[in-house]
Image: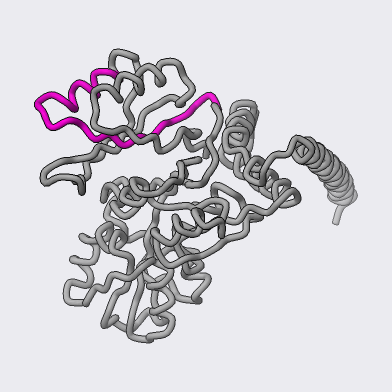
Amino acid sequence: MSDTDTGQSSNSEQRLQGLRDAIDQADHDIQNALNRRVELVQEVAEVKLQAGGDDAVYYRPEREAQVLRRVKQDNPGPLEDNTVARIFREIMSACLALEKPVQVAYLGPEGTYTQSAALKQFGSSMKGLPVASIEHIFSAVERGNAAYGVVPVENSTEGPVNQTLDCLLNSPLTICGEVELPIHHNLLAQQADVKPDVIYSHQQSLAQCRNWLAQNYPDVEQIAVSSNAEAARLAAEQPNCAAIAGDSAAQVYQLRIIEPCIEDSRDNTTRFLVVGTQDVGISGDDKTSIIVSTKNRPGALAEILHLFQQNDINLAKIVTRPSAEATWAYMFFIDFQGHMQDRSVVSVMEEMESKSVAVKWLGSYPVAAI
């Protein structure tokens, strides 16, 4: 090696060492800043405790949404906005766990998409409570066994989840937040070279992979089970069976991914709702959900929708469900932009109550931040 090569190598090592020292200092600064944030959060907890607040007040969905939007707006890069938001979600989750870990009910067992949605909303420091059905999620929160529940409400290709809509109609719980989760289905099995006798999955997932299954396994029996994770658990116990589930289920149940991303639509996304007992304050970018039962006369629904147009309120979704009160009577689940405390929303709700058989407010909550 020449003297020139030796000099260049020495300069590179010195530069690398300088960069490593700078990284160490940056890590030290981050650690100090994190601990300072924790101290401030603990002071906030003391103030809330002295004010006599209940446990639910520790978790403020509107405040977290504001923080996540701000860090995305202020992010100069090179990290992507959602990456920065996810980091801050974990920071807030860890801080909240020091005050009081949040118990969250989700559709179990471990490894479901609902669990992934709960982790996206509450961070990995939450205390998960897996339950057997959507009805059990509502029941767990109503009985106080969990502070919040996460339930699927609609899929971009298969539409609404009627079990959740029916539970919202009959439950006293309110909607506290929403989560949007891209869904990628995988075919899982113990062995790649064995044709399955049965393919297990949740009914919605089987529907979302309908065309792929028809092309690749037209003669294989499909059995719907309570969740994708339950399907993976069954496949792990039965060598000649397969499951349709996500990456997390493959890891939990130690199955091989035989074929990734078998969903028919590459834009497959499921929207989840967070249900709880608290009313959520204004975050600045909010959504409200209601149920309306209209009078049985021509133009009744059109009158309701016209109220939103008059008040310049954007409708996000309308879903029709049969009413149990009378034959061929219907209820309408409506999502729209705005918060229940907004003047325009108050005006619409007051006018709507005079034109409808019944209006049930389901909740006002922040629009999904990440």
69 falls in the magenta region: no
Left or right: 13 in relation to 292? right
Return the residue nearer the eye: 107 or 277: 277
Residue 323 rendering spot, x and y as whole percentages: 20, 45
Write the residue at 49% across / 75% down: 253
Q: Is residue 112 above or below residue 288?
A: below
Residue 219 in picture, x, y percent from top left: 17, 76
Instruction: From the viewer's perspective, tell me whether residue 172 is left or right of residue 8.
Output: left
x 60%, y 44%: residue: 86
Q: Does the magenta stretch include residue 293?
A: yes
> Is residue 75 left or right of 318 when viewed as pictured?
right
Visible in this render: residue 285? yes
Q: Is residue 109 above or below residue 182?
A: below
Q: What stretch is highlighted in magenta?
A: 283-308
Q: Where is residue 234 in the image (x, y as percent from the top left)?
A: 39, 79
Task: Say above or below: 46 vs 304.
Answer: below
Q: How many marks?
A: 0
Residue 129 in the image: x percent, y percent?
55, 63
